[in-house]
Amino acid sequence: MSGSRTDLLAWVNDLLQINYTKIEQCGSGGAYCQILDSIYGDVPMSRVKMAAKHEYEYLANYKIMQNVFKAKKIDKPIQVDKLSKCKMQDNLEFLQWMKKFWDANYGGQGYDAVGRRKGAPMEPPATVAPVASGARSATGLSAGSARTGGRTPVGGFRSGSAQPNEAVQQLQAQVRELSSHLEGLEKERDFYFEKLRNIEILAQTQLEVLEAEHKDDVTLREIQKILYSTEDGFEVPETAPVDEEETF
């Protein structure tokens, strides 16, 4: 399958009325979802995060894509783990396939991309930078600074150094990057915790209904067992002493 990066970007930007500057930005999944919507017109675009910035938003977009592929019986594996890392080659190859699929299935009808997004702001998604690379860079920088010899005075950098300001800026940028990534991980954690909590409530409610009818459900019991299981070393004590006098 052919298609240069320049040609594919021009096609995506024109079709979706967006302003992507590099193929890697397609890794957020939003553009792929809307390309499918331009063909079928029934993708739930209200749930698609076109300006996704966090990994959990990327994964939510790919889940929508997978549902569309399943519903339309599209026999094409979606390598989410590779695409969501926003690597150029993986997304270039997938976008080439998407263009070929679009050419074969688009009916020529007009498509109001902005209208389908309901005018949602279309800031291009940021490509994800692996945290490990930033951590290694920070470590390397610190080690390099240590090897240059001597201690930095408390009041500032050693005189004669030509790199202090640049080094500080690099570290500050890494801190901002890590803080942003941490925020995304916390949101992703809360997102999946809420799902598990809803499953727990649903299972418990249904079991209470069955118990009132003197019935039971083995599957629900197994679900509860999984939800309440713990790792070795983190078991909750069967009996814990309670100090009734203790107040908080």
Image (cartoon, grey):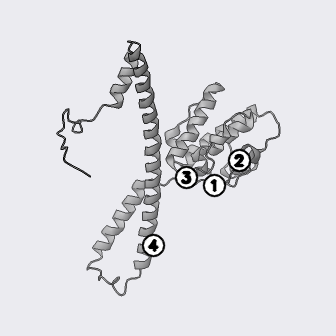
- Counting residues from the start of the chain, the first of labels 1 and 4 encountered is 1
| Residue 87 left/right relative to 248 | right
Of callouts 3 and 1, the N-terminal one: 3
Question: Can residue 83 be seen?
Answer: no
User: Mark on residue 124?
Assistant: 1
Q: Is residue 100 above or below residue 131?
A: above
**Residue 245 at x, y = what percent?**
19, 47
Q: Nearer the viewer, mark 2 or mark 4?
A: 4
Percent coordinates x, y for residue 194 in the rendering = 45, 39
- Could you tell me the amino acid type at mark 1? Pro
Query: Outermost residue, bottom direction?
Result: 159
Looking at the image, tell me whether mark 2 or mark 4 is earlier in sequence order: 2
Q: Which sits earlier in the primary sequence, circle 2 or circle 1?
A: 2
Q: Earlier in the sequence, mark 3 or mark 2?
A: 2
Q: Amino acid at mark 4?
A: Gln
In 3D space, how far apart are the residues under numbered discs 2 and 4 (Cα atoms)?
35 Å
Please state the horizontal and vertical placement of residue 115, each as a whole percent of the image: 76, 45
Cβ atoms under marks 4 and 3 closer than 8 Å = no
